[in-house]
Amino acid sequence: DVVMTQSPLSLPVALGQPASISCRSGQSLLYSDGHTYLNWYQQRPGQSPRRLIYTVSDRDSGVPDRFSGSGSGTDFTLKISRVEAEDVGTYYCMQGTHWPYTFGQGTKLEIK
Amino acid sequence: EVQLVESGGGLVKPGGSLRLSCAASGFAFRDAWMSWVRQAPGKGLEWVGRIVSKVDGGTTDYAAPVRGRFTISRDDSNNMLFLQMNSLKTDDTAVYYCSTRSQVTSFDHWGQGTQVTVSS
């Protein structure tokens, strides 16, 4: 299975400040069709996961533009330009290139 | 509006069986690839398995921890997804989510989850 390694695992951030989460995969996520199937999910406390980003950098409908994704190959980053109170929760990267799909361990974002 | 509603969770003894259901609405279910994902208490997310649409072959794939014990099926006539879980272990205790997604368009939906507890 492809191991997805996130850092940091805990991320205290002041309101209005930027935040960044790194995700590294154990092998390249570039698929033979040219797409890189790297996703980012947000899970607020007590809620189901919600996808924020697909194919590395495409934002899902309704996701604020303060969320952005970047990267290629095996190294990826989720950035929040200005953290808001509603961003509290756990963030997971997830690869959809190799079966079984796998998630990172999760990064818990809290307000400092 | 897309809706995925899981049911069938509960408390079961080790070695027992349980069948989860997921009622889907608001999208073309017969064309959708459907998945089950679980989350153990206080832990991260783990793929259980997936079933592709019949037009794409209708095949199923499972993660290693459940292969041979869990079976995913679908009833396209009634927009239902199922997860048959046999030989349950305490490690299977989790919230089980039904989900569907596109990997290349903005379409990704999850149910509210159903709790499965395996304990003697």
Image (cartoon, rainbow, N blue to C red):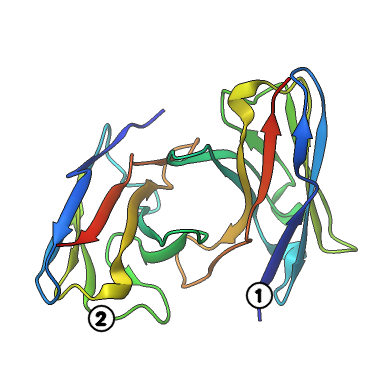
Element under disc 1? loop
Which residue was labeled with disc 2?
A: A65
Tell me the distance, in whole angstroms, between the alpha carbons under discs 2 and 1: 23 Å
Q: Position of residue B13 (x, y in %)?
A: 77, 23
Residue type at mark 1 is Val
Point out the residue furthest to the right here.
B77
The reply to the same-chain question for discs 2 and 1 is: no
Query: Within the image, what quadrant is residue A64 found in?
Result: bottom left
Element under disc 2? loop
Q: Nearer the viewer, residue A111 or B98?
A: A111
Q: Position of residue A69 (x, y in %)?
A: 23, 64
Q: Residue at x 15, y 76 (%)?
A: A82
Q: Nearer the viewer, residue B32 or B42?
A: B42
Whether residue A73 can be seen here? no
Query: Is B70 on the left-hand or right-hand side of A20?
Result: right
- The disc at residue B68 is none
Query: Is A71 on the left-hand or right-hand side of B28?
Result: left
A2 versus B79 height, above or below: above
Q: Nearer the viewer, residue B8 or A54?
A: B8
Q: Residue at x 21, y 47 (%)?
A: A10
Residue type at mark 2 is Asp
Q: Residue at x 50, y 61 (%)?
A: A47
Which residue was labeled with disc 1?
A: B2
Q: What chain does badge 1 belong to?
A: B
Quarter of the image where the N terminus of chain B is located: bottom right
B89 versus A47 height, above or below: above
Crowd tier of the residue under label 2, counting other residues whose Cα lies within 10 Å: few below 14, some 14–19, many 20 or above? few
Q: Position of residue B17 (x, y in %)?
A: 82, 28
Quarter of the image where the C terminus of chain B is located: top right
